Image (tube, helix red, strand yellow):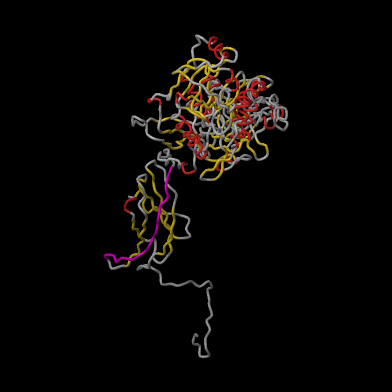
Amino acid sequence: MVAAAVVLATVALPALSSVLFGAFGGTAIGGSMAAGMAAASTSAAALAAKAVAGIIIGVAISGASMLLMGKPKVANQSTISRLNLTVDPTAPRKIVFGRTAAGGDVRFHEMTNKSGEYIETSKDKGDYQHRVVALASHKIHAVKEIYLDTELSYNGSAVVGKYQPKSGLLITPILEGNSGNASKLGSGLYWKETAKFTGCAYLKVSQKLDVDVYPDGLPSRWTTVVEGCPVYDPRRDSTNGGAGPQRPHDQNTWQYYDGFNELGRNPALSLLTYIIGWRINGKLVWGMGIPASRIDLGNFIHYANLCDEAVSTKSGFVKRYQADCILSTGDTHEGNMGIITAAMGSAKLIDMGGLYQLVGGYDDLDGPALTLTADDLVGAYTYNPSAASLKDSYNFARGVFTNPEKQFLLEDWGRIEVNPLADGIPRPLVVDLAAVTRAETCQRIAKQLLVRNNYTGTFSGIFGPRAFAAQVGTLIRLVLPIEGWNQPGKLFRVVSQAESVDLIFNMTLQEENPAIYAWDDDEELALPADIRPSAYNPNASIPVSSLAASSRTITNSNGGIVSQIDVTWEEPDAAVQSIQINVREKGSDKWRTATDRFSHRAEKYTMAAMAGGIEHEVQARFLMFSGVYGPWTTVSVTAAADSNASNIIGFLDNESVTFAANSGGTIL
């Protein structure tokens, strides 16, 4: 179990907080209550009650509930559109965290001839196409793979597969544009030697326009798999509670890897990096630009460790939370940070007293809790056992995730169910997790959100000075006998807190329960079956299966013996139109067409042998309904001897031959 000490210790005026918490934490103070009213058992409480007279209690219940329950946003447009190259001069900048497919924004395009000279494509036919493809508006750690359509075409160091360099495909990855890696592209008239695309990661691509290489045109789908942005990790910063050279104000000290630890996939660190923001030439280009002094770095250290914790799955141990996502400067900060935060389950980012920090997302319920009683209430209170209406309740969850096994397409991660609702009507919670690349993690997160929906009870009230020891995220044990909450008290978490008057706090609490975070290996479900039909491929074809040839003889009407060859095969599926069969004498370089478009359903074709007693080769292929022929399949067969078969068993190489004979002249 992870302790909550870091979360509870990071409040304003920590010294006073520790005094109050040390004095009162865990000690229940007895008292009595009239229904809905707190008893003013001390003069201080009475004064406080007067001070808060007329104050309207609480924050809206729905808003308080959403803080720890909020639904993940749907997948952003950048996640969907990145798999195809796009030419859009107004495309926003892209941000890539973790290992995922990067952007595909074409920022430069030029056609040249064989000599590398620029041509007017409207007048002349180009021989080469040159493009600059923007991947991210920041430094990235590596380009790992590039797929053209579904063909692996770059393995991290070289062009591979059917588009090898001999095909005219050249790919040069630039991890961060600067003067040291600036170079021309194409004719050099426009993308010159000095062009450096400062601070951005991009590809320089040249393709030979060869119909033999690209018979169906240039592939439009490009999937560039990268290891993305380096991140700031306060655990590796000796000036902020860690140990190491990283500094929040110096991007050059940030890392994607530290040894084998893939820091760049840690969602807490990705979120922290987004809050700090990324600069090029000193100018903020994305992120919030919040100074480190306004971020609770101790809290982020705690959550970074939480994300790195190992959890057991059916396939072994994995990190609790990881984030692999692409974001856009065209989306709001709330939307971008929501995508990252959703990868940490029910965790939420809050701004508490001017400090950004995370709350929730893991089971800390056996950690320290502040006990409050009736004597701490100085005004009316409201308790709603169920803040969510029935129509806003859910009993099963489904959604999509980014599947690296399908080249980062969005795929269903499965379905998680809990007990039926009171009215028996099934209601789905859609949990789309664009930053999560493991189905098991999606299922684990979805269950948190589903079960959280069963514990939406909220308590709003005005509390006295002891509530100073609490902040948003603090666990509270509330002892109110009038509500039936005796020692050790009902467990809540603070979801809203505002100081109305000095040391008088208006707070909203949400109930907590260990069931929210319970997860067992046995609950992990297999991915849904992939029932989607494959995309139509006009070049698809199938080979002839079970092709065989045999020979026999028949007697013709003149009594002659005729040699025939029977060709058989297995009937193919409905995509085939007919079969073509050729034959030749073995050793010949010329085929003879036996039949061009014979019914493939017949599964047998009989033809006359070219000659009896000699070996034949037979080849066959299917003609598809698309007009494409399949590959040839070849078999051999020796034709049966017929009436015309030669009885000669050989020929003499010399004009005269001497045979051995005895003394009488008889050949031996």
Give the residue at the far left of this rendering: 557
Relative placement, left or right, of 516 versus 426 is right
Closer to us: 296 or 604: 296
Pinpoint residue 147: horizontal percent, then vertical percent: 54, 37
- Taking 4 as reference, is 352 above or below it? above
Closer to us: 268 or 150: 268
User: From the image, which quarter does the N terminus lie in?
Assistant: top right
- Taking 281 as reference, is 543 above or below it? below
Closer to us: 364 or 591: 364
Please say whether residue 203 is visible from this viewpoint.
no
Please say whether residue 435 is visible from this viewpoint.
yes
* Residue 142 inside the magenta-drawn segment: no
Task: Tell me which corner region of the image, top left, top right, bottom left or bottom right, holds residue 639.
Answer: bottom left
Magenta segment range?
A: 540-557
Pinpoint residue 412: horizontal percent, then vertical percent: 45, 36
At a point 50% along the width and 85% down the height, the residue shown is: 668
Closer to us: 562 or 624: 624
User: How many numbered discs?
Assistant: 0
- Taking 162 as reference, is 109 above or below it? above
Pinpoint residue 455: horizontal percent, then vertical percent: 45, 29
Give the residue at the far bottom of this rendering: 664
Pinpoint residue 128: horizontal percent, then vertical percent: 58, 32
